[in-house]
């Protein structure tokens, strides 16, 4: 939690708040196995900002997004918290 809090407090980071009408629609997302209804808005937000990182402890979600090619098609990276931490530490 301290990592999340620190990231939210770091105003030097590129932070964006997107209203619902600016989130991309992802065809087939609602039917994709492994993507729960509560995850969809976060996936759409990540897909709306090229180069973003979707950090989730839900390995099934990461696998589903990669298997469907959604991460590549929309230019974002789904990562587990440990992978995201390694990514931040190594640049």
Image (tube, grey):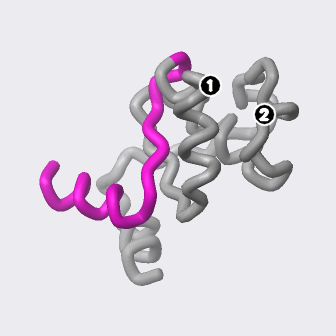
Mark 2 is surrounded, within 10 Å at the Cα level, by few (under 14), some (14 to 19) or many (20 or more) other residues, namely: few
Looking at the magenta stretch, what is its main secondary structure? Answer: helix
Residue corresponding to mark 2 = 32
Q: Does label 1 or label 2 sit earlier along the sequence?
A: 2
Vertical relation: 2 (above or below) 40: below
Q: Is residue 13 left or right of residue 40?
A: left
Say which residue appears at 85% left-offset and 49% top-offset.
37
Q: Quadrant of residue 7?
A: bottom left
Q: Magenta stretch: give its range.
A: 73-91
Question: In the structure shown, which secondary structural element does the residue marked by tag 2 occupy?
Answer: loop
Please say if the residues under marks 1 and 2 sit with CB atoms less than 8 Å apart.
yes
Say which residue appears at 37% left-offset and 59% top-offset.
11
Residue 1 or residue 30, whichever sits in front? 30
Image position, residue 5 (x, y; %): 45, 76
Cα–Cα gap, marks 1 and 2: 8 Å
Image position, residue 77 (x, y; %): 44, 38
Say which residue appears at 77% left-offset and 23% top-offset.
25
Question: In the structure shown, which secondary structural element does the residue marked by tag 1 occupy?
Answer: helix
Residue 28 painted magenta: no
Residue corresponding to mark 1 = 68
Say which residue appears at 52% left-offset and 29% top-offset.
71
Count numbered badges in the picture: 2
Residue 84 painted magenta: yes
């Amino acid at each position: 939690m301290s990592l999340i809090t620190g990231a939210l407090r770091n105003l030097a980071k590129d932070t964006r708040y997107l209203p619902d009408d600016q989130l991309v629609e992802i065809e087939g997302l609602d039917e994709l196995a492994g993507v729960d209804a509560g995850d969809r808005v976060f996936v759409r937000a990540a897909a709306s900002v090229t180069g973003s990182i979707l950090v989730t402890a839900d390995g099934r979600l990461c696998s589903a997004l990669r298997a469907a090619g959604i991460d590549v098609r929309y230019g974002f990276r789904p990562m587990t918290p440990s992978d995201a931490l390694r990514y931040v530490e190594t640049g």
